[in-house]
Amino acid sequence: MDLLSHAITTTGRRSNNEDDLCAVPRLGLFAVADGLGGYEGGEIASALTVEIFERFVERNERDPSGTWPCKEDKQRSFTENVLRAAAMEAHHSIVSRRTGPLRQMGSTVAALLVSGTTAAIAHVGDSRVYRLRNGALEPLTRDHSVWAEMVAAGRDLPPRHEFPFKNQITRALGLEGNSIADTRVIEVATGDRFLLCTDGLYDPFEDDALARLLGEGEVEGCCKRLVELAYEKGSADNITAVIVEVS
């Protein structure tokens, strides 16, 4: 299957951009990352994350027998294992550099790896992957955040944008505790359109508005409009979006 894509990251209303991304159609790899830990730390952590994802996937394509940072999970697909291992390698790389002014740094990640008629998805933190199919928007990740975990536990909470701790995440690469990526594998079909994004992009939108906007126009124009509208609607964070269409 052919993949059309467009990717944008912008500082938005912040003084610096702690988001990063990669979009490599020849590898079928797309990812976004949102850095944590302050001005310099966040930038370094997100850049390390996407760099390692691209490098690991490309290296594994050349030599699948190469060294991995973890054992293969036989209950998961090969592509899931690739993304899971890339996330672990990124985690170890961030941890190894967490000294001095970088001691608090970490990063979220959301990644898509398309292979044939399937795609693997991996994520850590509150960056997201969505799929638009036949006009219906489906979230393919569930945030590792206080709000999402309380909702999953059955707590009666206000909408995320009204929750006072909406940006408090429970999992991130580089941080102590759980940093393992959640993964899944899905079927892909011609016409599917995927959105990978950080919270600065999705925060201002309700799902129905996001679904409508994601389905409008060509990939490049759609991506630009989403980022521009997120800013116009008041996004206070860096804004990052990657759109991938299966054609």
Image (cartoon, grey):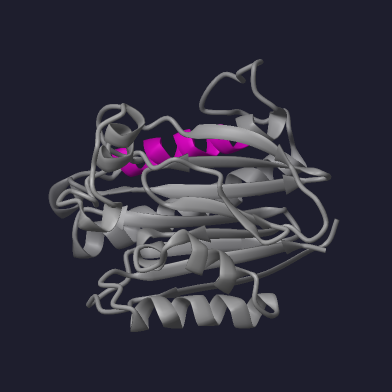
Q: Total of numbered circles in the picture? A: 0
Left or right for 221, reference 201:
right
Above or below, 226 relative to 243: below
Magenta span of residues: 82-95
Q: Nearer the viewer, residue 166 or 123?
A: 166
Left or right for 126, reference 58:
left
From the image, which quarter does the C terminus lie in?
A: bottom right
Q: Residue at x 53, y 58 (%)?
A: 196
Res. 15 image quadrant:
bottom left
Q: Nearer the viewer, residue 190 or 46?
A: 190
Q: Is residue 28 magenta?
A: no
Res. 223 image quadrant:
bottom right
- x then y, percent, for residue 163: 20, 51
Left or right for 235, reference 143:
left
- x then y, percent, for residue 233: 33, 79
Q: Main secondary structure of the magenta part?
A: helix
From the image, which quarter does the N terminus lie in?
A: bottom right
Q: Residue at x 56, y 53 (%)?
A: 130
Above or below, 29 relative to 236: above
- x then y, percent, for residue 28: 72, 53
Q: Residue at x 67, y 44 (%)?
A: 59
Q: Nearer the viewer, residue 169 or 87?
A: 169
- x then y, percent, for residue 181: 47, 34
Q: Nearer the viewer, residue 209 or 140?
A: 209
Q: Residue at x 24, y 52 (%)?
A: 167
Most distant residue in the front direction: 156
